[in-house]
């Protein structure tokens, strides 16, 4: 979807205003609707696969439950029909915090990347529903975004046997 000149000018004016106030300028929106992302704290420039590996280790060590969420499309099980699988725009990791709150983590490479418009819509939907959706570029950024949430959780483990 193309941006009109009016929208482009409004974004440019907002970016200039942010620079004057000492804030970061607006992220660039590409013609396909994706948004350029950059880390909020300095992160090492590593590939996305390395970011995902250290994310999994860190999350599990801090008592959260996560699973890898694979998304894609193609010819499944040798079928001639083309099909999609996964949650459109879903994060790379899907799980929950120790208190049961929904958690999604989207990983990008260390120096930055692009968040698709479907990922942005998913992020807003999860956050509106009271869940936690974080977009990270490395371990330092993960710690900055999740440690405050984990420190506020008072764990009371009360495990009841299943009724069946």
Image: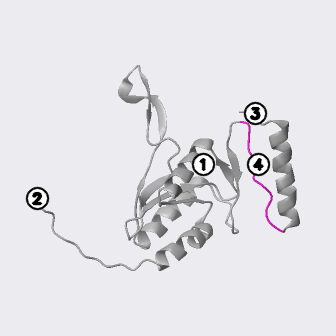
Asked if the residue at tag 4 contacts the one at tag 3, i.e. Cβ–Cβ closer than 8 Å, the answer is no
User: Residue, x 87% and y 52% (percent of image)?
Assistant: 13
Rounded to the nearest angstrom, the CA distance separating label 4 from label 2 is 53 Å
Mark 4 residue element: loop
Which of marks 3 and 1 precedes in the sequence? 3
**What residue span does the magenta drawing correspond to?**
22-31
Q: Residue furthest left?
A: 164
User: Residue, x 84% and y 68% (percent of image)?
Assistant: 22
The residue wearing badge 4 is 28
Mark 1 residue element: helix
Other residues around mark 1 within 10 Å, as few (<14) / some (14–19) / many (≥20): some
The answer to whether 48 appears left or right of 84 in the picture is: right
Where residue 104 appears, as percent x and y from the top left, is 48, 57
Residue 2 — which label?
Answer: 3
Rounded to the nearest angstrom, the CA distance separating label 1 from label 4 is 14 Å
125 and 79: which is toward the camera: 125
The residue wearing badge 1 is 120
Residue 164 — which label?
Answer: 2
The answer to whether 133 appears left or right of 162 in the picture is: right
Give the answer, above or below, for where 102 lies relative to 73.
below
Which of marks 4 and 1 precedes in the sequence? 4
Mark 2 residue element: loop
Where residue 97 appears, as percent x and y from the top left, is 42, 67
The answer to whether 106 appears left or right of 16 in the picture is: left
Rounded to the nearest angstrom, the CA distance separating label 3 from label 2 is 56 Å
């Amino acid at each position: 979807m193309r941006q009109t000149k009016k929208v482009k000018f409004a974004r440019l004016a907002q970016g200039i205003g942010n620079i004057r106030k000492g804030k970061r300028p607006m992220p660039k929106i590409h013609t396909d609707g994706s948004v350029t992302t950059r880390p909020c704290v300095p992160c090492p420039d590593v590939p996305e696969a390395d970011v995902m590996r250290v994310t999994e280790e860190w999350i599990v060590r801090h008592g959260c439950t996560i699973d890898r969420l694979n998304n894609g499309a193609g010819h499944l099980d040798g079928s001639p029909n083309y099909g999609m699988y996964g949650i459109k725009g879903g994060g790379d990791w899907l799980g929950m915090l120790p208190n049961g709150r929904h958690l999604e983590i989207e990983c990008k490479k260390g120096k930055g990347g692009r968040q698709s418009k479907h990922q942005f819509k998913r992020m807003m939907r999860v956050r509106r529903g009271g869940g936690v959706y974080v977009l990270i570029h490395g371990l330092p950024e993960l710690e900055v975004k999740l440690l405050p949430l984990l420190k506020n959780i008072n764990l009371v483990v009360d495990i009841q046997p299943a009724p069946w």
